[in-house]
Amino acid sequence: MSRTLSDMRPVHVIGIGWHRYQFTSETPYVELGLTAVRAALADAGIPWPAVQTAYVAKALLPMAPGRAMLRHLGATGLEILHVEDASASGSAAFRHACLEVASGASDVVLAMGVDKPARVALAERSTGIPSLADDAIAPFTHFAMLADQYAHRAGATVEDIALVAVKNHRNGSLNPNAQHQKVRSLAEIMGGKAISGAFTSLQCTPVGEGAAAVIVASDDGIRALGVDPARAIQVVASVGRSQRVYEDATRFDALLTGETSGLAFAQSGLTAADLDVVELHDAFTVEELEYVEAMGLCAEGDAVRQLKAGAFDIGGRCAVNPSGGLIAMGHPIGPTGIGQIGEIVLQLRGEAGARQQPGARTGLAHMVGIGAVCYVHILQRPG
Amino acid sequence: MTEPRLLMPQLYDGGSPPALQGGVCDCGHVFFPLQAYGCERCGGHGTRLRPKRLAARGRLVASAVVHLHAGERPAPFVVGSIALDDGPVVRTLLAGTEVSLPPGCRMVGTLVPVTPAQDGTPRVDFRFAPVTGSDLS
């Protein structure tokens, strides 16, 4: 019989840490990664030898970066596993770290992501199946066409869609780990460099470098290590899915998101109405509108109206991408899904400072990756 | 004058309008392009998959003018997503427009001249273009 996370023993996030997401620099990946892991250990208040397994998410670094980095914390002999799932690499690493603890195989596990920009080929171009012009359709063009579709379907203007970037840059301006930390007006965003369709550069995620780390633990691990249980945030749902054949083939990102988040709600016994904070894959503005609708945070076609009314602002009904999201916080690929978990933990502990969503108790993290694959995690604070 | 060569004859023919080389599975799933690995809907393979010519006619789902592109293709260019009357959704370059077009617009396949082959043979490649009065046959 198969079991979900909610059928197994409880898993908690006990430590979080980052190296700021930033534009490409000379900083070696080892320094990025160690900064994030040491911050997560310090946040949890546990020593490195307590960590039994490390899941290292990366999509752009060369083969086997894990031990070459982690040995500098002390070569304890822990299991090291690399995870690649495109943009969702970090989310996949987190899910499997949670499952390892939930299953009882380990009590304390690290999930971390680290990457530096590099040109990598997509396997989809190596399948031996030819395409008419897939080389002409980069991810920003795929989503530019979805923006065109959304605008016509929902009666939204290109300015309406760009309001997502206004909100997320505002949130990012309050986040010391964000790649973009500047408030941007709608005029600035619309007047930026034209990329594809209605998208200008500030409506697209900047792919940079960085690292993020989280430590997950069982109740036994928490007790044994003397971790403060009040700062431990439980993971109440974890779901990973991939694209099926959908009736409307053009909207696979949103349909896959709806399906995956639906399974996560079923697993946790929660609904979209229970969410106080959501971190979602807003690599391009239109995605946020598509996904809040797909998750059921608002009705189909109503996302712009809700956005304009402030429902998704910090302080609104449900803060969406309070970290700044991929658009402002950035998208170093491997770290991104891990960083989302870190932001939700900060929010649910009440430690998010100027970005704090008041009274946040329940948060959801969502990522999609090329393939397409999708991950959804739901976290909840005690009490 | 040398007859132009198709750039990707495995994907379309030289008809007017050209037909797309798709496939159909015994389960009924129609797909483009043709491949023999297996059906995405049911996993059927081998003789369950057969070639099917797909009429290059359909409705525009969405389009975008690409202003910035890292590949060899010089920007700007226009791409579109077309729901074929025969089922599959196909994404490719658009001809006959320098701007994005309204979704729902009727589209038809066409062959346009591209860079000649190294031996100087002229070549044509497939595009979708908005239907004009002369295409309504």
Image (tube, grey):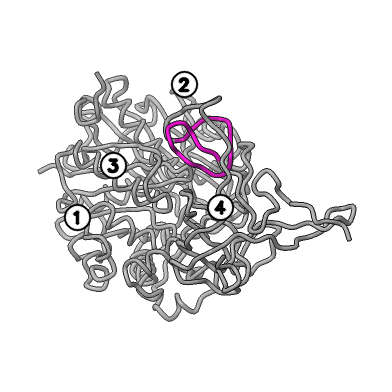
Magenta includes A318?
no
Q: Which residue is mark 1?
A: A276
- Badge 1 and badge 2 in a common chain: yes
Q: Residue A151 at what x, y percent from top left? A: 38, 69
Q: Secondary structure at mark 1?
A: loop
User: Which residue type carries mark 3?
Assistant: His
Query: Which one is nearer the viewer's eye here, A138 or A110?
Result: A138
Mark in front: 4 vs 2: 4
- Badge 2 and badge 3 in a common chain: yes
Query: Which one is nearer the viewer's eye here, A113 or B16?
Result: B16
Mark in front: 1 vs 4: 4
Would you say A94 lies left or right of A130 here?
Answer: left
Q: Residue A102 at what x, y percent from top left? A: 26, 26
Residue displayed at 13% across by 42% down: A382
The magenta segment is: B23-40
User: Which residue type carries mark 2?
Assistant: Gly
Q: Which residue is mark 3?
A: A377
Spatial CA span between label 4 and label 2: 60 Å
Would you say A227 lies left or right of A136 here?
Answer: left
Q: Secondary structure at mark 4?
A: strand
Q: Which residue is mark 2?
A: A77
Mark in front: 1 vs 2: 1
